[in-house]
Image: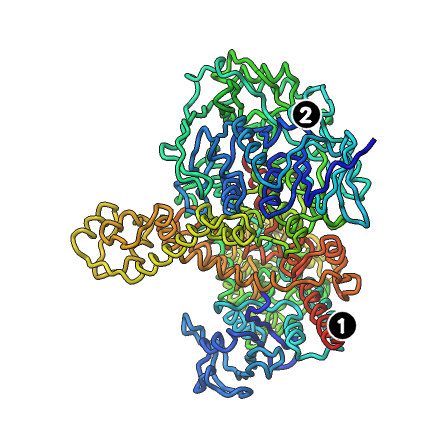
C-alpha cells in the first residue's frame, strides 16, 4: 500500500484549458508507455523531457487523446519516485478517459487524498518544517474528497451496487458455511450456482459500464426532451426549470453549440435537457421552429415533456406527435391552464389513452411541483427504462467496476475448470470488495455477520 | 493468615486448555512454572463438546503442535474418532476433527504436566493479584498462600463470577458445578480492568443404553485416520461412531410452548452469547421456518455411557429439557444423565491487551483463553501457548513473539482480539483469515516449526526431520519442473482414464500436475522420484504445484501488507499531538495503541487519511530525533 504506483488528476477540475494526470511509483513509466503512441520510447528517454504523442487504449487500439507526456525519474521528482505527467488539452471527458485507462493498468491505483504530498514528504522532498502543513493538507483534501465522493455516488447507483453486493455476500456466506460447517445440513455449493450468480453480476456490471463506455453520461440526468409547437411555452418551461433549480448550465467541451445540454433537477430528480439551444432559438425566430426539430430530440430522449397550450385547439402536428409518443415515457403538460380552455382533452386521449397529464401555468409558476411528482412516479415506479439511468461517470468507479467484473469472470472460469470452492471464493470476494469500494463500504466483519444471520448454526 | 508459599518465574492461574499450553510452554522454555487450578481433577477438562478440531480450529491445533505445544499430541493419544473434513474442497480448508475420550484426554494431559520438569501443578483458588510498582508480582489464594512470580498468566475460562442458569434456577457456579472464582474478578476490577459479561451454554448428556440408534444415521470415523501432531506417525485407537438425528415438529412445539420459561427470553441472561453457538430455543425462534435441526449424538469416552447431544445446547428448565429430548427420533425413551445449562462469566475486554497478550494496564500480567472473550478449546489453547511463550520471553529477556496474520490462525485471532475487540464470544472461522490459502492444515510446520525450534519448544530430532522434509519437497518440485513427459501410450491412457485431455507434445510434469484432475499419485508411476518421499512430502509437492498461481497471488498481498506491518509506531507516541487526525481515529488509536502501521490500519474508524497523517507525523518525529542525534 505504501509503495504502490498511484495516479490522479493533479490540476483543478474545470479550471484552465489543460489538465494534467500525475502518475508516481515504480510502475509509472512502463504503465504509461503501454498506452502511449509516439516516436519516443518512454522507457528510454532522458529524465525531465517532454514528449508528444497519442494515448491509445492498448486493448482496443482506440485513440483517445493527443497529449504531452513528461517523464521525471526519481529521486529528482516531486515525490522522489519515478513520475510521469500526462498533459491533455481536451476537456473533462477525455481527461477522465485517460485516467480511466491509466487506472486499469496492473499495479496502479487511484491516489489517496494528499498522497503525492505525503510521499514527497516521506521521501524527504519537503522540508521538515512543513510537516504540519502537510498533515493539514491531507486532512483537508481527504475531507473534501469524501464529501465529493458522497456526492458522486448517485443514489440509484449506490442502491444497484448494494443490490449486487447483497447477492455476492449471500453467495460468499453460502460458500463459507460450506467450508466452516461442512457437516451442517445446508445445501452444498455447486459450480452451477456460482456461475449463475457471478453471471448475473457480470451482466449488471456490464449494463453499468455501457453507459460509462459511451462516454455519454458524465453527469446524472434523465435524458429529457421538451417538445411542442411554437408558442406553447417550451422556453418558459425551460427557464422556469432552470431558475427554479439554479441549474448549472454546462457547456460540455467538444460538443457543438446546437446540441448543448442543460442539467436541472425537478423534484430532486436530475434531468438532462436535450436541445435546449433549439428551444432558445425559438425565442427569436418563432416561425422557424418545427416539429421536425422536436422529433430529432425525441429519438434520443428517455423522457419527453410534451407541452400543449390549453388555450389552443389540438393541432394536426400535435395529434401526430401524440400518436407517435404513445409507447414512450411521456408527460403531457397542459400549459397556460389559466387561459380559457380551448383544447379538448378527448382528442388527446384518442391519441394517447393513458397520458401522464400535468396542468401547468408556467407564467403563474403553477404546476411545477406536480410535474416533479409525475416524473417521480415514472422514475420510481420503474417505468422508465434507459441505459442512461445508471450514472457511472467517475474514473475510479469505472476502474473498480471493471475489476469487479474481471474477478467475477475469474470466478466463473475457475468454476468451469473444476477449481475447489474455497479458491473460487477468493475471486468472488474480490468482486464483492471492489464493488464495496465504490460505495465506501468496507469488508469488516459483515461477511461473518451475514453467515450467522443467513444460516442456523450451532452445537 | 497468609504465608509465603513459593517463588516462581511464571504462575499460570487455571489449568484448562489455555493454562495447560501456557504452563507447558513456559516450563519447556526453561522457566520455573506453577500451574494453579481450583480443582486438580479438572485439568484440561472439556466442559462442552467432546471433540477437538474442525475448520480453523483444527488448523490451530496443527499450529500449536508445529510450535511444540501439547494439544495435538494429546488428542492423538486419546481420540475415539478421527475424520478429515472438507476433503472435497481445496487443500486450505481440509480440516481434521477428532472425537475425544474426554476423561482420557484429561488424564493424559495431567500426566504430561506432572512429568514435565520445572512445572509444578497445585490445587488452589487465586483470589487476589499482587501488584507492586504497577507490575504483577504474584497472587494470594483462598487458603492464604502467597505465590510470587516474575510473570503471571490468567486463564480463568468461564470461572470468573460464573453463574449457571437453567429455567428459573440461577446459581453461582463455574462450569459443571465447579466453584466459581468471585474474588479474582473483583481484584481485576480494582486494578482498573474493563470486564464484560459473556454467556455460553452446553446441551444435556444422555445414557447410551437408552438411545434407539436404529432411528439415527451412523457417522463413522475415517478408515485411515490422519493425526494432529507431526510427531504422531502411528496410532490405531479403536474408533466409535457418532449418530445423526433431527428435531421433530413436536420438539419445536414443546420449545415454543415453554418460551416463557426460557431465560434467554425472560431477561434472566444478561451476558452476550456466541452467535455461532445458539441454544436450541434461540435457533427455533430465529429460524422459525426451518422444519428440523440436526442433532449429533457423540460418545464422551470409552469408559462412560454418557452421550453428548450436539445441537441441543439449552438453558430451558430441567423438566422441559427432558421433554425436548424425548421428542427427538431415537431418544423417545432416553434417560438424561446431566442437564444442559447456560453459564455467564466475566471476560476482559481484549483491546486492553498488547499483541503479546500482556495487559497494557498491568505489566507482567498476561491473559489467555475465554477470559479474553473467545470460545472454544482450540482458541483457548492457541492463545495459551502464545501467552506462555511471551511470559517466558519477558522473564528470560528475549524479544516478544507475535505471529503475523499471514503466519497462522493464531496470529489472525490474537490480532482480531487486540485490534478490534469482540462483541460476542469469538470463534475462529476460516473466513476470518485473509490469507486462507497460505494458512493450511498441511503446512503448519513449514510456517511455525522453525520458530518453535528457535524458542526451544521443538526437539533437535524433530527439527532435523522437519529440515529433511522441507528440503526434499523443494528438491522434488525442482525435479518436476525439469522432467519432460512424452505423449506416449502410458501417459495418454492415464489421462484418458481421468477424463483429461491427451497431450499433443512433450510436456513438463509441472503443467500436467496443475490440471485439477491429475494428482501426484497419477504421475508417480510414470516418472518415479529418485528421492525417498513420505506421503506428507508428496502432498506438499502436489499442493505447492497445483495451487501455485493462487498461492503466489496471496504471497504478493502479504508482501505488500508487510511494509505496513514493518513500520513500527513508537511506544511513546502521543496521539493528542498528531495534528489532523479525525477525532474517532485519535480516540481509537489512543485506546488500542497499535504497534505498527499495519495494525493501526485494521482498527475500525481509522481511515487511509489518518494513516497518511500518522506516517507523516512519524517521519517528522524520526527526523527530529535524528537531528537531535
Query: In terms of depth relative to the viewer, which is nearer, B400 or A29?
Result: B400
Q: Residues within 10 Å of mark 1 (few under 14, many from 20)?
A: some
The x, y position of residue B621, in whole percent, is: 73, 70
Secondary structure category for the residue under label 2: loop
Q: Which residue is mark 1?
A: A132
Up/down of B293 relative to A245, above or below:
above
Q: Which quarter of the rendering shows the N terminus of chain A?
A: bottom right
Secondary structure category for the residue under label 1: helix
Query: In terms of depth relative to the viewer, which is nearer, B439 or B61?
Result: B61
The x, y position of residue A213, in whole percent, is: 49, 66
Farthest left residue in view: B489
- What is the chain identity of the residue bearing mark 2? B
Up/down of B517 relative to B242, above or below:
below
**Which marked residue is nearer to the observer: mark 1 or mark 2?**
2
Q: Tell me which corner region of the image, top left, top right, bottom left or bottom right, holds residue B178.
A: top right
Q: Residues within 10 Å of mark 2 (few under 14, many from 20)?
A: some
Up/down of B213 relative to A75, above or below:
above
**Disc number at residue B279?**
none
Query: In terms of depth relative to the viewer, which is nearer, B163 or B282?
Result: B163
Q: Which quarter of the rendering shows the C terminus of chain A?
A: top right
**Disc number at residue B178?**
2
Farthest top residue in view: B333
Query: In terms of depth relative to the viewer, which is nearer, B152 or A440?
Result: B152
The x, y position of residue A176, in whole percent, is: 50, 43
Q: Separation of disc 1 and disc 2 at Cα? A: 59 Å
The x, y position of residue A14, in whole percent, is: 65, 75
Q: Is residue B478 visible?
A: yes
- What is the chain identity of the residue bearing mark 1? A
Amino acid at each position: 500500500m505504501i509503495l504502490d504506483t498511484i495516479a490522479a488528476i493533479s490540476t483543478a477540475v474545470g479550471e484552465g484549458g489543460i489538465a494534467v494526470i500525475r502518475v508516481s511509483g515504480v510502475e509509472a513509466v512502463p504503465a504509461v508507455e503501454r498506452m502511449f503512441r509516439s516516436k519516443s520510447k518512454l522507457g528510454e528517454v532522458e529524465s525531465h523531457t517532454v514528449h508528444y504523442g497519442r494515448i491509445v487504449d492498448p486493448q482496443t487500439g482506440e485513440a483517445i487523446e493527443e497529449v504531452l507526456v513528461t517523464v521525471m525519474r526519481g529521486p529528482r521528482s516531486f515525490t522522489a519516485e519515478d513520475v510521469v505527467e500526462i498533459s491533455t488539452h481536451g476537456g473533462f471527458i477525455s481527461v477522465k478517459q485517460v485516467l480511466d485507462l491509466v487506472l486499469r493498468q496492473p499495479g496502479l491505483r487511484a491516489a489517496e487524498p494528499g498522497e503525492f504530498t505525503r510521499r514527497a514528504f516521506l521521501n524527504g522532498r519537503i522540508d521538515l518544517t512543513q510537516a504540519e502543513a502537510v498533515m493539514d493538507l491531507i486532512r483537508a483534501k481527504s475531507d473534501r474528497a469524501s464529501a465529493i465522493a458522497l456526492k458522486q455516488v448517485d443514489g440509484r447507483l449506490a442502491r444497484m451496487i448494494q443490490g449486487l453486493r447483497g447477492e455476492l455476500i449471500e453467495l460468499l456466506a453460502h460458500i463459507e458455511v460450506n467450508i466452516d460447517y461442512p457437516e451442517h445440513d445446508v445445501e452444498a455449493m455447486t459450480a452451477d450456482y456460482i456461475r449463475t450468480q457471478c453471471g448475473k453480476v457480470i451482466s449488471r456490471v456490464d449494463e453499468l459500464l455501457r453507459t460509462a463506455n459511451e462516454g455519454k453520461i458524465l453527469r446524472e440526468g434523465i435524458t429529457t426532451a421538451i417538445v411542442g409547437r411554437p408558442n406553447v411555452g417550451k422556453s418558459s418551461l425551460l427557464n422556469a426549470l432552470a431558475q427554479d433549480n439554479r441549474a448549472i448550465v454546462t457547456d460540455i467541451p467538444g460538443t457543438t453549440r446546437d446540441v448543448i445540454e442543460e442539467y436541472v433537477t425537478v423534484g430532486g430528480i436530475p434531468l438532462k435537457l436535450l436541445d435546449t439551444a433549439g428551444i432558445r432559438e425559438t425565442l427569436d425566430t418563432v416561425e422557424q421552429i418545427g416539429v421536425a426539430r422536436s422529433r430529432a430530440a425525441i429519438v434520443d430522449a428517455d423522457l419527453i415533456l410534451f407541452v400543449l397550450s390549453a388555450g389552443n385547439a389540438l393541432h394536426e402536428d400535435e395529434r401526430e406527435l401524440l400518436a407517435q409518443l404513445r409507447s414512450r415515457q411521456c408527460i403531457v403538460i397542459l400549459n397556460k391552464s389559466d387561459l380559457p380552455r380551448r383544447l379538448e382533452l378527448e382528442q388527446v386521449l384518442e391519441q394517447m389513452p393513458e397520458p401522464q397529464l400535468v396542468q401547468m401555468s408556467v407564467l403563474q409558476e403553477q404546476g411545477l411541483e406536480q410535474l416533479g411528482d409525475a416524473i417521480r412516479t415514472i422514475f420510481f415506479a420503474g417505468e422508465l427504462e434507459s441505459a442512461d439511468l445508471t450514472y457511472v461517470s467517475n474514473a475510479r468507479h469505472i476502474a473498480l467496476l471493471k475489476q469487479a467484473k474481471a474477478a467475477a469472470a475469474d470466478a466463473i472460469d475457475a468454476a468451469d475448470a473444476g477449481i475447489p470452492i474455497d479458491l473460487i471464493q477468493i475471486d468472488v470476494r474480490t468482486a464483492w470488495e471492489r464493488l464495496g469500494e465504490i460505495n465506501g463500504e468496507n469488508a469488516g466483519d459483515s461477511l461473518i455477520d451475514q453467515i450467522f444471520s443467513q444460516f442456523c448454526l450451532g452445537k | 493468615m497468609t504465608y509465603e508459599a513459593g517463588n516462581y518465574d511464571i504462575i499460570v492461574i487455571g489449568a484448562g486448555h489455555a493454562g495447560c499450553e501456557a504452563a507447558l510452554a513456559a516450563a519447556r522454555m526453561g522457566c520455573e512454572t506453577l500451574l494453579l487450578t481450583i480443582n486438580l481433577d479438572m485439568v484440561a477438562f472439556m466442559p462442552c463438546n467432546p471433540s477437538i478440531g474442525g475448520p480453523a480450529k483444527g488448523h490451530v491445533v496443527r499450529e500449536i503442535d508445529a510450535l511444540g505445544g501439547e494439544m495435538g499430541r494429546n488428542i492423538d493419544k486419546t481420540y475415539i474418532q478421527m475424520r478429515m473434513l472438507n476433503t472435497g474442497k481445496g487443500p486450505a480448508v481440509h480440516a481434521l476433527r477428532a472425537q475425544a475420550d474426554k476423561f482420557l484426554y484429561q488424564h493424559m494431559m495431567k500426566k504430561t504436566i506432572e512429568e514435565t520438569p520445572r512445572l509444578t501443578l497445585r490445587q488452589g483458588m487465586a483470589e487476589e493479584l499482587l501488584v507492586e510498582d504497577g507490575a504483577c508480582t504474584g497472587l494470594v489464594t483462598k487458603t492464604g498462600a502467597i505465590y510470587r512470580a516474575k510473570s503471571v498468566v490468567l486463564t480463568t475460562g468461564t470461572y470468573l463470577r460464573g453463574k449457571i442458569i437453567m429455567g428459573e434456577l440461577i446459581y453461582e457456579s463455574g462450569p459443571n458445578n465447579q466453584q466459581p472464582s468471585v474474588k479474582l474478578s473483583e481484584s481485576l476490577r480494582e486494578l482498573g480492568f474493563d470486564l464484560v459479561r459473556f454467556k455460553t451454554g452446553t446441551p444435556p448428556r444422555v445414557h447410551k443404553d437408552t438411545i434407539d440408534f436404529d432411528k439415527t444415521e451412523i457417522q463413522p470415523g475415517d478408515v485411515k485416520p490422519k493425526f494432529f501432531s507431526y510427531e504422531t506417525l502411528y496410532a490405531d485407537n479403536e474408533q466409535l461412531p457418532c449418530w445423526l438425528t433431527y428435531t421433530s415438529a413436536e420438539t419445536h412445539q414443546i420449545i415454543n410452548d415453554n418460551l416463557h420459561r426460557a431465560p434467554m427470553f425472560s431477561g434472566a441472561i444478561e451476558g452476550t452469547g456466541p452467535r455461532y453457538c445458539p441454544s436450541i430455543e434461540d435457533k427455533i425462534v430465529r429460524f422459525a421456518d426451518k422444519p428440523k435441526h440436526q442433532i449429533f449424538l457423540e460418545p464422551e469416552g470409552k469408559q462412560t455411557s454418557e452421550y453428548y447431544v450436539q445441537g441441543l445446547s439449552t438453558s430451558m428448565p430441567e423438566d422441559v429439557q427432558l421433554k425436548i429430548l424425548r421428542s427427538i427420533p431415537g431418544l423417545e425413551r432416553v434417560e438424561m444423565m446431566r442437564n444442559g445449562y447456560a453459564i455467564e462469566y466475566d471476560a476482559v475486554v481484549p483491546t486492553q491487551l498488547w499483541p503479546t497478550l500482556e495487559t497494557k494496564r498491568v505489566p507482567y500480567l498476561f491473559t489467555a483463553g475465554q477470559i479474553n472473550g473467545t470460545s472454544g478449546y482450540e482458541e483457548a489453547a492457541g492463545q495459551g501457548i502464545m501467552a506462555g511463550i511471551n511470559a517466558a520471553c519477558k522473564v528470560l529477556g528475549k524479544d516478544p513473539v507475535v505471529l503475523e496474520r499471514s503466519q497462522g490462525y493464531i496470529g489472525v485471532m490474537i490480532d482480531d482480539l487486540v485490534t478490534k475487540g469482540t462483541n460476542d464470544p469469538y470463534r475462529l472461522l476460516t473466513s476470518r483469515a485473509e490469507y486462507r490459502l497460505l494458512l493450511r492444515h498441511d503446512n503448519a510446520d513449514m510456517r511455525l516449526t522453525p520458530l518453535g525450534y528457535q524458542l526451544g519448544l521443538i526437539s533437535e530430532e524433530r527439527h532435523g526431520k522437519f529440515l529433511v522434509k522441507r528440503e526434499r519437497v523443494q528438491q522434488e518440485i525442482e525435479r518436476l519442473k525439469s522432467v519432460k513427459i512424452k505423449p506416449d501410450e502410458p501417459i495418454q491412457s492415464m489421462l484418458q482414464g481421468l477424463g483429461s485431455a491427451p497431450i499433443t507434445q512433450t510436456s513438463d510434469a509441472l503443467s500436467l500436475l496443475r490440471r485439477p484432475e491429475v494428482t501426484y499419485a497419477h504421475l508417480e508411476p510414470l516418472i518415479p522420484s529418485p528421492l525417498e518421499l513420505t506421503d506428507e512430502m508428496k502432498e506438499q509437492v502436489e499442493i505447492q504445484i497445483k495451487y501455485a498461481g493462487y498461492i503466489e497471488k496471496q504471497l504478493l498481498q502479504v508482501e505488500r501488507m508487510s511494509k505496513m506491518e514493518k513500520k513500527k509506531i513508537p511506544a511513546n507516541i502521543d496521539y493528542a499531538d498528531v495534528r489532523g487526525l479525525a477525532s474517532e481515529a485519535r480516540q481509537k488509536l489512543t485506546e488500542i495503541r497499535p504497534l505498527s502501521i499495519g495494525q493501526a490500519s485494521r482498527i475500525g474508524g481509522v481511515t487511509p487519511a489518518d494513516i497518511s497523517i500518522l506516517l507523516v507525523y512519524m517521519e517528522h518525529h524520526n527526523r527530529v530525533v535524528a537531528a537531535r542525534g
